[in-house]
Each structure stands twice: as C-alpha cells, then as structure tokens.
Image (cartoon, rainbow, N blue to C red):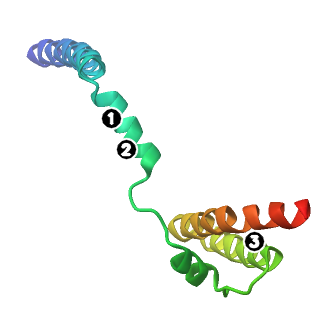
Amino acid sequence: MAAKILANLIIMGSGIMVRALAQAYRQALANASKNGVAQEAVQNIKRGGKVMSESEARQILGVTDNSTWDEILQRYDNLFERNAKSGSFYLQSKVHRAKECLETIHQPKEKEQSAD
C-alpha cells in the first residue's frame, strides 16, 4: 500500500516539475526576445566566428594559386566523398568551407572573363 502511494507521489511530482520547467523555458525565451539576446545570438551565428583565409582554403583542398576552378571542384568532390565514407563530418565541413572561400575568389574572375 505504501509503495503504491509513493509511486503516485513520484508520478504527480514529476508531472508538476515538467510543467514548471516548460513554463520557465517559455518565460526565458520571452525575456530573451525582450532584451534582444535572441537577435544577438542569431547575428553571432551568421557571422560564423573565424573566417577562413585563402591560403588555409588552398591548403585544405591541396591546390595552388595557379589551379583552375575545375581543378578546385575536382579536389573538393574527391575530398568531400572520401570524408563522407569515413564519417568525418568535421573534415567534410572544413572542405566545404574551403570551397566556399575559394568560390568567392574565383567566381568574380570567371564573370569578368566571360564579359570580355
């Protein structure tokens, strides 16, 4: 009999705790949006912290200054697929960021050449 009462108390207590935590979470979100903390966090995420340099991107992909965009894409595809098979998400993301960095450098040059 005592075990049944104790079990009921534990179940009721945990339900109350879950509702209180949910309400506290909602209140914290409301306070964060009022203070602008949420917008600041989103801006920090968009900035992405440290920006990759061109030399670091070239090192990651194993290309030189004289490499064409097609060579860079081949290296990117090769490295990305290799890391997909081995399961290294960190290395995949580094390879992808390196391609994005070099893309910003090579794409304007290709547009200038096609306009000429």
Amino acid bearing label 2: Asn
Q: Position of residue 69 (x, y in %)?
A: 78, 74
Discs 1, 2 touching: Cβ within 8 Å: yes
- Residue identifier under label 1: 40
Seen as rendered, the residue at the extreme front is 116
Amino acid bearing label 1: Glu
Q: Locate the N terminus by quadrant.
A: top left
Q: For this rendering, which residue is in front, 104 or 100? A: 104
Discs 1, 3 touching: Cβ within 8 Å: no
Give the Cα separation between the discs numbered 1 and 3.
35 Å
Residue 88: give its label: none
Determine whether the residue tagged by mark 1 lies in a helix, strand or loop: helix
Seen as rendered, the residue at the extreme left is 2
Q: For this rendering, which residue is in front, 25 or 40? A: 40
Where 34 falls versus 101 (above or below)?
Answer: above
Viewer-side label of 3, 2: 2
Mark 2: give few (<14), some (14-19) or many (20+) Cα within 10 Å: few
Q: Position of residue 74 (x, y in %)?
A: 79, 76
Q: Earlier in the sequence, mark 1 or mark 3?
A: 1
The picture quadrant where one finds residue 99 is: bottom right
Mark 1: give few (<14), some (14-19) or many (20+) Cα within 10 Å: few
- Residue that appears at 59% across and 67% down: 92
- Residue that appears at 40% across and 39% down: 43
